[in-house]
Image (cartoon, rainbow, N blue to C red):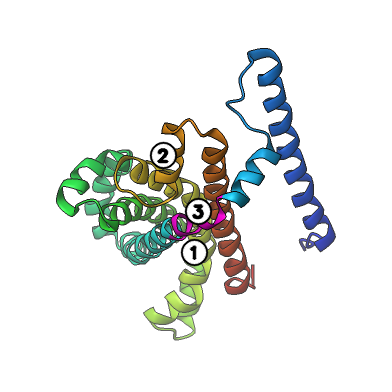
Amino acid sequence: MKRRTPAWLRIGGYVFAVAFIIAGWWITAELLVAFAHTNVLPTPLETFNVLLAYADALVPFFWTSAYRVALSLVIGTALAVPIAHLCARSRTLDALFAPVLYLLYPIPKVVLLPILLVLLGLADAPKIVLVSLTVFFQVLVAVRDAVKAVPESSVLAIRSLGGSRFDEYRHVVVPATMPAVFTSLRIGVGTAIAVLFIAEAMAGSTGLGYFIMQSWSMVNYPRMFAGIMAMALLGLVLYAVFDVVERLITRWK
């Protein structure tokens, strides 16, 4: 039986991780000043002070990006999960749509941004659609493979007890594939935020991506790194939310 990691050890791990990152960041900044004679990389203290100074200006950009990526994760997952189940449990559907998936999945979805901008304009819609597509394919691939990996003996066992097709999904297939859903979402968070950054930087005047690139164009590097910290915080919060929700939903795990 797998033993749970003590709470103090988990907290200590996060403290060590934060200290390790800050120390590496600080040393790199000082080395750049000493040997390259450039302050392009501000120290953590400088960035934190700027983050506090621009907090009021950053909040609207932060919430705009949070809204876009959260809605995209919901849309992409809501579309991908049922399609993945249908394809994995039906040989006919899988034979028809698997080649489509193999052809479309490797294409970087960000190349569709110019097309979406032409069709949907510069508001939220093209950014949400682009990130939703990215999440959709990542979740679809992971869940489809997870459904296929469900032991047939487990399905036959519930059938032998008189269970219906709904019971198969409720008691066997869905519980067995939920960890794959959350794993794909945790992986997808980083990709989704990266794609959102590109979309916001290229088109529009809102969101953290725009804030970061605007700061870069102003050669205001501390302000730029404050925006980067805010975007990193967004990814960390979403990752932690998925971790908590998974613990609540998959208690049996």
Q: Which percent across, then down, holds residue 173?
A: 46, 69
Q: Which residues are magenta?
A: 54-63
* Magenta residues, dominant SS class: helix
Distance of label 3 from label 2 (alpha carbons)? 12 Å
What amino acid is found at the position of numbered circle 2 in the picture? Gln
Q: Nearer the viewer, residue 139 or 86?
A: 139
Q: Which percent across, then down, holds residue 200?
A: 36, 46
Q: Which residue is mark 3?
A: 58
Query: Crowding near pointer 3: few (<14 within 10 Å), some, many (20+)?
Result: some
What amino acid is found at the position of numbered circle 3 in the picture? Leu
Q: Nearer the viewer, residue 194 or 167?
A: 194
Q: Which residue is mark 1?
A: 177
26 sits to left or right of 112: right
243 sits to left or right of 204: right
120 sits to left or right of 225: left
Distance of label 3 from label 1 (alpha carbons)? 38 Å
Query: Crowding near pointer 2: few (<14 within 10 Å), some, many (20+)?
Result: some
Residue 214: which quarter of the image? top left
